[in-house]
């Protein structure tokens, strides 16, 4: 009889331990979602080179050449990105206006919502799940009867939001890899974002535009590499005063800095 009682007690104890262990493994349906990567992890800033008033035709071309060359170089990329990444950018930016839903069985979170862009309606679903000290992200987009659940981009970010990357497809009709985005930020005024062309067999594969912020006097910069011409353009400026400088061997035929002042007029570099 004592043996039976002892066996029963051990069995009940074992079941209790198992129940506690199983309850510990099951995550709450209200498990808090990881923070989304910052908007600056995806969207490059072009605002300091986007004011058409800075290119007034009344200005003498020779007096504003250095600034003008910087403006033109940056805006070529601005146009390409604005057109080529319109839907991916719209889908990502809209995610910040919505709450995630946790799915215990898949152990992931989804942000589901509608996006309107260019007169068209899209359904977007951003999924995130934990992987060690990172979050893996996947964005699927649906557009009416044209395409459904197209994995337009995916990526990974540090759970503390200090860096990560994205891989973007070109478009549903051409689902090859198009762009890799690498980003970093330290929350102390230093950050960078790099778009690199990764289209297979493309002449510009490996070309990039690299934007960053620093605590230096010239606190903003672009590095723009034209792969086809093997030419690197460097642009640095102060985003408050707007004075800056440009180095572009392909255009100026030298490796020197060419400067402009706070009035955007050409000046001799200090």
Image (cartoon, grey):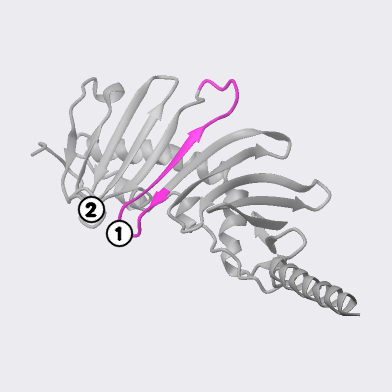
Side of 152 relative to 53 (left or right): right
Task: Confirm or deny contact between disc 2 and disc 1 (CB under 8 A).
Answer: yes
- Secondary structure, mark 1, is loop
Vertical comparison of 131 with 107: above or below: above
Residue 250 is situated, as x and y percent measured from the top left of the image, at 31, 22
Q: Identify the residue at horizontal 15%, vertical 46% (top origin).
A: 261
Q: Is residue 73 magenta?
A: no
Callout 1: 10 Å neighbours few (<14), some, many (20+)? few
Q: Identify the residue at horizontal 59%, vertical 69% (top origin).
A: 97
Callout 2: 10 Å neighbours few (<14), some, many (20+)? few
Residue 116 appears in which quarter of the rendering?
Answer: bottom right
Residue 199 appears in which quarter of the rendering?
Answer: top right
**Which residue position holds label 1?**
188
**Which residue position holds label 2?**
215
Q: Identify the residue at horizontal 24%, vertical 24% (top origin).
A: 252
Residue 245 is situated, as x and y percent measured from the top left of the image, at 21, 39
Nearest the camera: 154 or 108?
108
Nearest the camera: 47 or 18?
18
Q: Earlier in the sequence, mark 2 or mark 1?
A: 1
Magenta region: which residues?
184-203
Point out the image quarter for the C terminus.
top left
Point out the image quarter for the N terminus.
bottom right
- Secondary structure, mark 2, is loop
Side of 29 relative to 65 (left or right): right
Q: Identify the residue at horizontal 50%, vertical 42% (top origin).
A: 181
Residue 215 is situated, as x and y percent measured from the top left of the image, at 23, 53
Residue 220 is situated, as x and y percent measured from the top left of the image, at 28, 48
**Mark 2 and mark 1: Cα distance apart in space:** 9 Å
Q: Is residue 195 magenta?
A: yes
Q: Residue furthest front?
A: 2
């Amino acid at each position: 009889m004592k043996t039976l009682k002892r066996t029963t007690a051990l069995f009940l104890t074992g079941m209790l331990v198992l129940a506690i262990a199983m309850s510990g493994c099951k995550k709450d349906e209200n498990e808090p979602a990881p923070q989304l990567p910052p908007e600056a992890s995806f969207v490059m800033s072009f605002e300091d080179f986007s004011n058409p008033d800075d290119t007034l035709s009344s200005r003498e071309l020779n007096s504003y050449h250095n600034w003008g060359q910087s403006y033109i170089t940056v805006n070529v990329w601005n146009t390409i990105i604005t057109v080529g990444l319109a839907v991916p950018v719209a889908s990502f930016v809209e995610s910040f206006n919505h709450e995630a839903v946790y799915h215990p069985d898949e152990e992931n979170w989804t942000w589901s919502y509608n996006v309107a862009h260019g007169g068209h309606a899209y359904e977007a679903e951003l999924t995130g799940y934990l992987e060690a000290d990172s979050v893996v992200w996947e964005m699927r987009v649906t557009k009416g009867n044209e395409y459904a659940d197209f994995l337009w981009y995916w990526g990974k970010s540090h759970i503390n939001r200090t860096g990560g990357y994205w891989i973007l497809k070109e478009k549903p009709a051409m689902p090859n890899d198009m762009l890799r985005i690498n980003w970093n930020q330290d929350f102390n005024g230093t950050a960078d974002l790099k778009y690199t062309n990764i289209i297979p067999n493309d002449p510009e594969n490996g070309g990039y535009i690299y934007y960053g912020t620093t605590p230096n006097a010239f606190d903003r910069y672009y590095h723009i590499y034209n792969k086809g011409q093997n030419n690197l353009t460097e642009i640095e400026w102060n985003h408050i005063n707007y004075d800056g400088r440009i180095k572009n061997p392909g255009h100026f035929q030298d490796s020197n800095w060419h400067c402009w002042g706070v009035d955007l007029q050409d000046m001799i570099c200090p």
